[in-house]
Image (tube, rainbow, N blue to C red):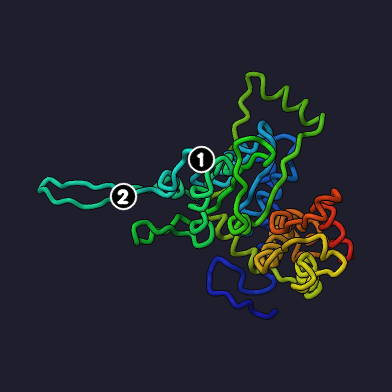
Amino acid sequence: MTSLKQTDNDLAQTDDELIVQIEAAGEELSQVRQAAASVIFGQENVIELALITVLAGGHALLIGVPGLAKTLLVETLGTVLGLDERRIQFTPDLMPSDILGSEVLEESESGKRHFRFIKGPVFAQLLMADEINRASPKTQSALLQAMQEHHVTIAGERHDLPAPFHVLATQNPLEQEGTYPLPEAQLDRFLLQIDVDYPDESSERRMLLETTGTNDNAAKTVWSADKLMKTQRLVRQIPVGESVVEAILKLVRSARPSSDGGNPGLSDMISWGPGPRASQALMMGARAKALMDGRLSPSIEDVIALAEPVLKHRMALSFAARAEGVTLPQIISQLTANLD
């Protein structure tokens, strides 16, 4: 077999070793999903998308009305994956220093004064930004550098964040009072937008019976941070066929206005579309999805399955489309239909 160009001793050096590692990782990820599903009922698709986000090394935005276990999901994933998890409750009066940290002036016993940096809650492996759209735009933007570059700059000094670093933010629907829409630049930093819907009747029945008794359905640690980072490196080794690459490019480019290489038939419906970061998100997401299923490479079906979570927050409808009642899921469905 041909050798793979890797320098990390933990990664596969031959195609045979890669196959073994992918199959083993698929079985281990099945245990991770089961551990999370034992606490979060009726949200199997949400759990899968959240795990895909983390395996791909990205951040996720979970959107849903209050009471759908979004916060519990993040806490559960932190426990199951063995990550240092912290939570920030976003409020209108929250300041950027409450997230990043700040410098305080201290005086030594000799009388010499100096500044000491006190780290904020952003210095965690898994950060839960709860109700992120309740904070002001100034505070929301405090996460931009951290999410993209994995470090923050305070008073001209760089402070690296722990590895791995992931933000799972929850957001209330924008129709609710007291919310601020996230800026487009920050939305683009989220690998996936995960819509959290109401559970079905059987799941809600199970939830009702198992969470109101004396049994404690606490999450159990299955993985570790080192195991997660090793698997994230494995995700990047998964080969992607040329047909899947072409499908990703075709889908993302067709989601733009026609003047930007998009679909002329939908040019009047789309105000602005996804950039190259969406293509990267689809590529990494498809690889992670294949790994979770124990498959050796992603398929076009993986691209179609992840199209809406990847594209929905990276597109905007035109005024004419909104006036006609057209929705983004409808547009994305039309675009993916051309990939079959």
What is the quadrant of the N terminus in the image?
Answer: bottom right
Are dots 1 and 2 in contact, CB under 8 Å? no
- Where does the C terminus fall, quadrant-wise? bottom right
Question: Which structural element holds mark 1?
Answer: strand
Q: Is residue 126 visible?
A: no
Name which quarter of the figure residue 296 lies in: bottom right
Q: Is any atom of residue 263 visible in this view?
A: yes
Residue name at image x 80 percent, y 68 percent: 254
Going by the numbered disc 1, the residue's amino acid type is Arg
Q: Position of residue 29 (x, y in %)?
A: 67, 51
**Residue at horizontal 43 percent and vertical 57 percent from the top:** 152
In percent of the image, x 78 and y 61: which residue is there?
270
User: In this image, 271 relative to 149: left or right?
Assistant: right
Q: In this rendered view, identify the residue nearer to me: 121 or 220.
A: 121
Q: Which residue is mark 1?
A: 87
Q: Which residue does the numbered mark 2 point to in the structure image?
A: 103
Q: Amino acid at mark 2?
A: Glu
Residue 33 at x, y = what percent?
Answer: 68, 45
| In the displayed structure image, the side of residue 220 where residue 299 appears, left or right | right
Against 98, residue 306 (above or below) is: below
Nearest to the observer: residue 21 or residue 123: 123
Residue 46's x, y, as percent?
71, 44
Q: In screen coordinates, is 167 left or right of 69?
A: left
